Amino acid sequence: MAAGGESGFRDGSHLSDVAAWGRDDAFAVGARTSDSSLSSGPVGLPPVAAWDTLAVRWDGARWAAVPGPGRGTLHEVCAVGPGAYWAVGTTALAERSGNISLVAHYADGHWQQVGFEGVGPLSGVAATGPDDVWAVGQDQDPRHASGALILHYDGHAWAPTETPVVGQAWLSGVACTARDNVWAVGTQQPQDGAFGPLILHFDGSAWAAVQPPATASPKGLSAVITLPDGTAWAAGLLSAAGDTGYTIPLVTSTQGGH
């Protein structure tokens, strides 16, 4: 890792995301494993129990690893205040099979896993403030069909939020500029169609599906960012092989139509 010192990482360590509150206050997150057969593979693939969460803090002079919130992988992190962060990912429980949602909070100098126990990986997290945090992923609860998963934190507790998606779907990214302007993107397979891009928008009261622009690829979307003026950009792949990427602008009907 560049910019100010040795990381101390060895083979088997992977960083997947970074967020900062200021030039001397940043975190990068990911996972590490001592299993040499998994050390060159992508983070987050089973078996999740073989990975330990990895968190690295930047203090303005150097990067230093700090104890993470336990077993599993961290996929994304966001800052909500000075020295305050949320991170999400996937973990596993010995008494249960499958991927378990991992939500962790950094405050007062340490990471702590919070008591939300959903089934399915979380891929993205974003916030407008410490009492307005969103996380997205895929609901893999075996009691019902898998679908998009959206969680919200109101400053006291995390809770699932109703989504307008019908059919198999998963969300890969979330971004927001205000409490009434939140975007989430991913992939969906309608009951009567093939896999394609999924775009959702939250207007402060409810989530709604947004028709993908005509320029969107038939493949899914993997990331989204929002700009200070309220507009958003999403990115994905043009081919299933993943060799060519693309970006598209996103607008709601209240921002001038599709």
Image: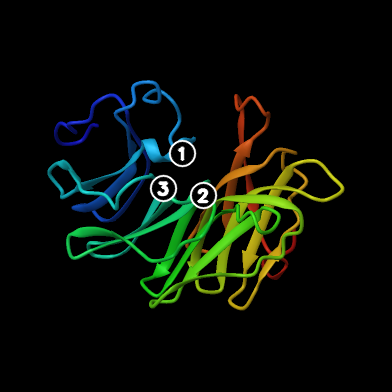
Please name the residue shown 49% across and 51% down the image: 96
Please say if 188 is above or below 203. Answer: above
Please name the residue shown 42% across and 74% down the image: 157
Assign a secondary structure to mark 1. Answer: loop
Please say if 242 is above or below 210. Answer: above
Crowding around mark 1 (Cα neighbors within 10 Å: few <14, some 14 to 19, many 20+) is many
Please name the residue shown 65% across and 60% down the image: 200
From the viewer's side, name the closer residue of 81 and 29: 29
Quadrant containing the N terminus is top left
Residue 80 lies in quadrant: bottom left
Crowding around mark 3 (Cα neighbors within 10 Å: few <14, some 14 to 19, many 20+) is few
Residue at the spot of label 3:
94
Residue 215, given in percent of the width and then of the height, sits at 74, 42
Check the image and tell me how it is coloured: rainbow
Residue lying farthest to the right in this orientation:
192
Q: Which of the labelled discs sits on residue 121, or is there none?
A: 2
**191 relative position to 107: left or right:** right
Q: Say which label, 3 or 1, has the lower sequence index.
A: 1
Residue lying farthest to the front in this orientation:
95
Assign a secondary structure to mark 3. Answer: loop
Assign a secondary structure to mark 2. Answer: loop
Residue at the spot of label 1:
44
